[in-house]
Amino acid sequence: MGNGEPDAGYHLSKNRLEALFDGIFAFAMTLLVTGLVIQPISDSEAAAELPSLVAAMHHEFFSFLIAFFVLASFWLVHHRQFHYVRTIDPALVRITLFILAFTVLMPFTTNVSGDYSEVQVAVDLFHANMFILGLLFLIHWKHLVNNPSLTSVEISKQDAANGMRRAMVVPFVSFLGLVCSFASPSLSMAIYLLIPPIFFITRRYFTA
């Protein structure tokens, strides 16, 4: 199994793994909204107090949006990577399960970073979660590149290099977030706004 050759007795289908991935990602992305909770107030106070309470939740809303769109980008990356997959081996299953474990953790780290946006350890949980997820997607891609027996077509050197550059964006940005959190925990969350322009620059100027 070390060389990536599929086990003849291993019958998990590509479609079942994709269905599990899609279902858990959809659930995790939906669960993110549960962190947006307004403290109970009476109907008589709602008209006066509700606007200020919602406005005070700007950190929670920002964390929610960052997590949602980064998870959406991970889902798209997985769709792109799985385009090449023909068959599944146990290593690919394990990598996918680790990805899903840290995906399910995202609502928790998102809520903590939003509720305690000025506390470094709180936002660093979010950055660490993002870093590990990004690293796992990088490992996922590298495993496919190194095991052509799993793919429907051999991944060219050009596609492999382009995929590696794309997969390195989130780990790089989340590491920057960790570093920036030492200066300002709340502002370090804004580092994820760099992801779209970095993807654009990567596609425009560094695609082989």
Image: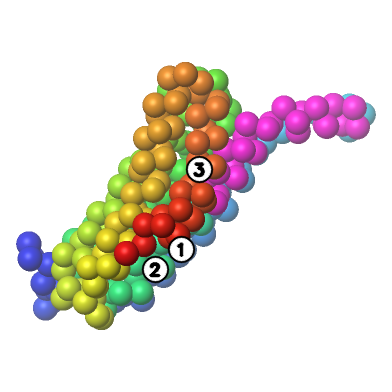
x then y, percent, for residue 95: 26, 56
The x, y position of residue 62, in whole percent, is 62, 38
What amino acid is labelled 1 in the image?
Leu
Cα distance between the residues tagged 1 and 3: 18 Å
Q: Residue at x 47, y 18 (%)?
A: 183
Q: Residue furthest left?
A: 2
Q: Give me the C-alpha separation between circle 3 and circle 2.
A: 21 Å
Decide: is 198 above or below 7: above
Residue at the (60%, 45%) spot, across then down: 65
Q: Which tag is nearer the camera, tag 1 or tag 3?
A: 3
43 relative position to 162: left or right: right
Q: Which residue corresponds to the image point at 11% horizontal and 78% vertical from the top-left? A: 8
Q: How many marks?
A: 3
Residue 2 versus residue 31 in the image, above or below: below
In the depicted structure, whether residue 126 falls above or below residue 157: above
> What quarter of the picture does the C terminus occupy?
bottom left
Judged by its main secondary structure, the magenta piece is helix
Residue at (16% x, 68% y) in the render: 147
The vertical placement of 79 against 47, above or below, is: below
Label 2 environment density (alpha carbons within 10 Å; few <14, some 14–19, many ≥20): few
Query: Pointers 2 and 1 in contact (CB under 8 A)?
Result: yes
Q: Is residue 122 visible?
A: no
Q: Please report contact status of discs 3 and 2: CB closer than 8 Å, yes or no.
A: no
Mark carried by residue 76? 1
Mark carried by residue 194: 3
Circle on res. 80: 2
Write down the region rendered in magenta: 46-69
In the rendered structure, which amino acid carries the disc numbered 2? Answer: Arg
Residue sitting nearer the eye, 7 or 172: 172
Q: Residues within 10 Å of mark 1 (few under 14, many from 20)?
A: few
Mark 3 crowd level (few <14, some 14–19, many ≥20, 10 Å Cα): few
